[in-house]
């Protein structure tokens, strides 16, 4: 089932939104808004005044994930209509303005006002909505009448002669056929929670796929084949042959088709393929590039079975479509992005995982859901809230937290009390339930069907959508609170297939999550090396999981059916920032803009430091804690770009690193380490000769390989200087910890070579479950060795 598209609002941010709104309120079609001569600063000042007013609010409205209207809500006894009519209890004033469009859609404005009115009436405190449009605005008079407004009389306001009109709840329901029910609102500030602003009209099909044009598809195809040639050659799935002209070629399984290209070679057998050079040939003819044909022509070399091939082609198609969508966004230069805010950087990422070719599959999302929930769409998301009966639900929290206080701090008393009232109206008691946040996709597509028995028997009760707006992060199922950035992230279960896994969350795993995070935070706080590096984690402070006992009886502990309903709350790094500090996902260091300029290069330039000095500060913040964790504690993370947040100073220098996604990713490899019982789950039996791959593979091959080659290709830092600086960081750390010398010798960072662990081979072998969770180390695909780029700098 596909969720209906949504009309949503969030509080208008005067500084952030002024430029956008300025274009709306000064447009000739907005003459009745009376801001035609306003500057951007005038607009910002006007809405800053509204934001500061206790009885007046402004909101930015979204339709199908795109900014589409401006809305104001006010108390008519205090604002706009004071003394002009006798207000009644429950009167709420409203203004709204639909963004002007060169291609208006029939019925769109009525759809917006209907959704806005439904949300206003969803607050049980609202008895009437009051409007006072200009008497000359006949178009709005007709629109108001269509949703139930009745004119009362003309009144004189200082700025206009207005038609005072009222709409009661009953009149709105009669005019529109809508039923207004209190549940959970996405208009902050109402006295109770109310239903999300939803309509049931589908996004027009032509608009939904407007990003899929021949030109964008061709560009996306070339980019994907470039990456496939580079990464499949790196993993030794393909063996490019040198050509007399200095280029390379690879042949299809049947030798009838060849792909020709040029490339630069870098450390760790990295292929920097030049995308514009790629051509496809068959029997003397040049053919257009086709990513799906590329995969099928090379399926033998790639080891794709009959079962895996069609799913992999679907993942490739989805990845291409995502690239085409990203190409519709206004281009942002790397230099500009490097000076942008945390979430602008997060949603500005375009590549995804640097190693995986099919890295944006998200199988399960329809196109409307992609536009609503994909990180690059940057659409506000309001989480669904369920009441889950305590007899099947477990909530655990870190030190110093209890359920009631935590939930009320996250949701606010009005929302929690509103949920209690919703349950009470059904004869149920909130004390018998725990509140669980759910990804909207998961509710509409999985829980409402797969858990239908739980819903029917009121073990799960739908409460509606929450007030806070969130932004999806690169991991898809984790959300940043954009309404209140200091509040926790929320990570949810999402039964969507992406990069070799169904992205669920185990209820059983959630139970130990806060304890694992508290243990690691304590270890870090007590260690002087971590303290000196200012290294930290953002803890997963609370978790909740629902156990479907019948599915548990039918499956093993790794089954996706056991991972459909759970969530965790992770600390926000925003609250820990010092003066002049700002945040960026570490994945941004690999980002390049359309002109080929890199985010990392922009930071280096802004910092004023020599490139090697900038790099060394980054390594001291990021690599040093990874090394110390391994050598001092046999502790390994999954420290890829999306799991690390960099804290930058005002000039773009890295001052510290913050690791996240702790409980599901960390392992302790020492079989004799003393661990608290609640933390025992993270102990892993990793073969001795594979332990250091946690650094060589995850850091060197899967991140530094790309960063070093990218900086060298851009001319920002020579490759030898890059790896020389990495070696110096390792060498100086080891010199500072002589008590660990035996371990430095046992696990040699300067060994001549290390095993190549091939990630794409995992996905190509089984793209539904690419790693056996019962034996992760045994599932690795090791293919020969890579020359260690720091060995010669020992």
Image (spheres, rainbow, N blue to C red):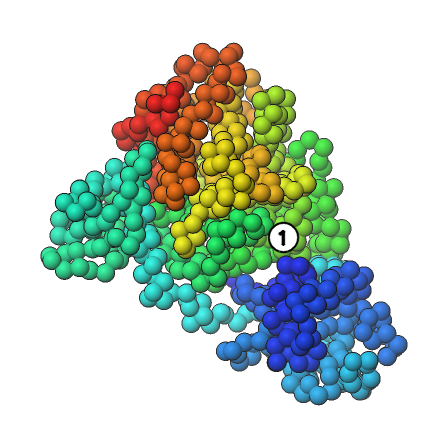
| Farthest residue, direction left | 283
Q: Name the residue tied to disc 1.
A: 482
Query: Residue at coordinates 16% horizontally, 47% vertically from top-left?
Result: 245
Query: Residue at coordinates 34% horizontally, 23% vertically from top-left?
Result: 792
Instruction: Note whether residue 341 is visible.
Output: yes
Say which of 233 and 8 sits in front: 233
Measured from the top left, where is residue 511 in percent x and y? 59, 34
Measured from the top left, where is residue 358 in percent x and y? 36, 48
Measured from the top left, where is residue 739 in percent x and y? 52, 11
Measured from the top left, where is residue 579 in percent x and y? 68, 41
Query: Residue at coordinates 45% horizontally, 15% vertically from top-left?
Result: 743
Up-down: is 786 above or below 586?
Answer: above
Up-down: is 589 above or below 329?
Answer: above
Left or right position of 14 against 52? left
Helix, strand or loop at disc 1? loop
The C terminus lies in which quarter of the figure?
A: top left
Say which of 440 and 444 sits in front: 440
Instruction: Note whether residue 515 is visible.
Output: no
Up-down: is 760 above or below 632?
Answer: below
Left or right position of 627 against 778? right
Say which of 350 and 59 sits in front: 350
Tell me which corner region of the image, top left, top right, bottom left or bottom right, holds residue 758: top left
Up-down: is 462 above or below 728?
Answer: below
């Amino acid at each position: 089932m596909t969720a209906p598209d949504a009309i949503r609002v969030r509080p208008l941010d005067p500084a952030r939104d002024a430029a956008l709104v300025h274009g709306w309120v000064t447009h000739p079609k907005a003459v009745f808004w009376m801001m035609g001569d306003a500057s951007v600063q005038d607009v910002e000042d006007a809405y800053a005044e509204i934001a500061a007013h206790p009885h007046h609010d402004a909101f930015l409205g979204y339709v199908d994930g795109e900014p589409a209207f401006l809305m104001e809500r006010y108390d008519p006894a205090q604002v706009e209509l004071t003394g002009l009519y006798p207000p009644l209890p429950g009167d709420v004033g409203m203004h709204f303005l639909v963004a002007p469009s060169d291609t208006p859609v029939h019925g769109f404005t009525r759809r917006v006002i209907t959704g806005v009115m439904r949300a206003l009436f969803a607050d049980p405190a609202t008895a009437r909505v009051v409007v006072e449009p200009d008497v000359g605005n006949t178009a709005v008079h007709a629109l108001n009448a269509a949703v139930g407004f009745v004119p009362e009389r003309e009144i004189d306001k200082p700025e206009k002669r207005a038609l005072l009109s009222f709409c009661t709840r009953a009149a709105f329901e009669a005019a529109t056929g809508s039923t207004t029910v209190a549940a959970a609102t996405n208009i902050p500030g109402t006295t109770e929670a109310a239903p999300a602003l939803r309509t049931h009209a589908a996004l027009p099909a032509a608009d939904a796929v407007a990003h899929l044009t021949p030109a964008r598809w061709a560009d996306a195809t070339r980019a994907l084949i470039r990456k496939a040639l580079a990464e499949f050659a790196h993993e030794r799935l393909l063996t490019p042959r040198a050509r007399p002209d200095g280029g390379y070629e690879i042949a299809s399984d049947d030798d009838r088709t060849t792909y020709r290209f040029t490339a630069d070679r870098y450390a760790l057998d990295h292929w920097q393929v030049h995308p514009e050079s790629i051509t496809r040939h068959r029997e003397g003819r040049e053919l257009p590039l086709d990513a799906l044909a590329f995969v099928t022509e090379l399926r033998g070399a790639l080891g794709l079975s009959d079962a895996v091939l069609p799913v992999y082609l679907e993942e490739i198609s989805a990845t291409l479509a995502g690239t085409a969508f990203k190409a519709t966004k206004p281009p942002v230069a790397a230099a500009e992005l490097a000076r942008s805010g945390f979430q602008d950087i997060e949603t500005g990422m375009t590549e995804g995982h640097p190693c995986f070719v099919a890295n944006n599959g998200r199988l399960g999302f329809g196109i409307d859901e992609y536009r609503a929930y994909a990180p690059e769409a940057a659409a506000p998301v309001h989480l669904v809230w369920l009441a889950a009966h305590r007899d099947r639900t477990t909530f655990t929290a870190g030190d110093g937290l209890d359920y009631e206080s935590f939930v009320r701090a996250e949701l606010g008393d009005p929302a929690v009390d509103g949920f209690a009232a919703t349950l009470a109206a059904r004869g149920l008691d909130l004390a018998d339930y725990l509140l669980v946040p759910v990804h909207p996709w998961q509710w509409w597509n999985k829980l409402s069907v797969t858990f239908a028995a739980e819903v029917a028997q009121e073990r799960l009760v739908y409460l509606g959508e929450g007030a806070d707006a969130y932004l999806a992060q690169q991991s898809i199922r984790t959300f940043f609170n954009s309404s209140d950035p200091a509040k926790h992230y929320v990570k949810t279960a999402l039964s969507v297939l992406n990069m070799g896994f169904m992205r669920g969350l185990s209820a059983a795993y959630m139970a130990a999550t806060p304890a694992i995070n508290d243990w690691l935070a304590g270890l870090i706080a007590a260690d002087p090396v971590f303290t000196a590096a200012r290294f930290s984690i953002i803890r997963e402070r609370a978790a909740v999981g629902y156990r479907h006992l019948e599915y548990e009886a039918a499956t093993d502990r790794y089954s996706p059916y056991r991972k459909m309903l759970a969530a965790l709350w992770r600390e926000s790094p925003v609250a820990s920032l010092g003066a002049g500090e700002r945040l960026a996902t570490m994945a941004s260091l690999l980002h390049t803009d359309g002109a080929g300029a890199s985010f990392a290069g922009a930071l280096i330039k802004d910092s004023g430091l020599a490139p090697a000095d900038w790099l060394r500060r980054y390594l001291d913040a990021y690599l040093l804690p990874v090394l110390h964790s391994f050598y001092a504690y046999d502790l390994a993370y999954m420290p890829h770009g999306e799991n690390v947040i960099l804290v930058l100073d005002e000039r773009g220098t890295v001052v510290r690193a913050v690791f996240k996604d702790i409980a599901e990713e960390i392992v302790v490899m020492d079989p004799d380490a003393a661990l608290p019982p609640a933390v025992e789950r993270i102990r892993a039996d990793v073969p001795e000769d594979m332990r250091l791959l946690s650094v060589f593979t995850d850091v060197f091959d899967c991140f530094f390989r790309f960063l070093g080659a990218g900086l060298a290709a851009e001319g920002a830092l020579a490759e030898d200087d890059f790896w020389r600086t990495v070696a110096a960081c390792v060498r100086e750390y080891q010199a500072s910890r002589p008590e660990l010398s035996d371990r430095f010798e046992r696990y040699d960072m300067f060994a001549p070579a290390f095993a190549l662990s091939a990630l794409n081979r995992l996905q190509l072998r089984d793209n539904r479950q690419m790693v056996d969770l019962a034996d992760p180390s045994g599932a690795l695909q090791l293919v020969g060795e890579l020359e260690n780029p720091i060995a010669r700098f020992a």
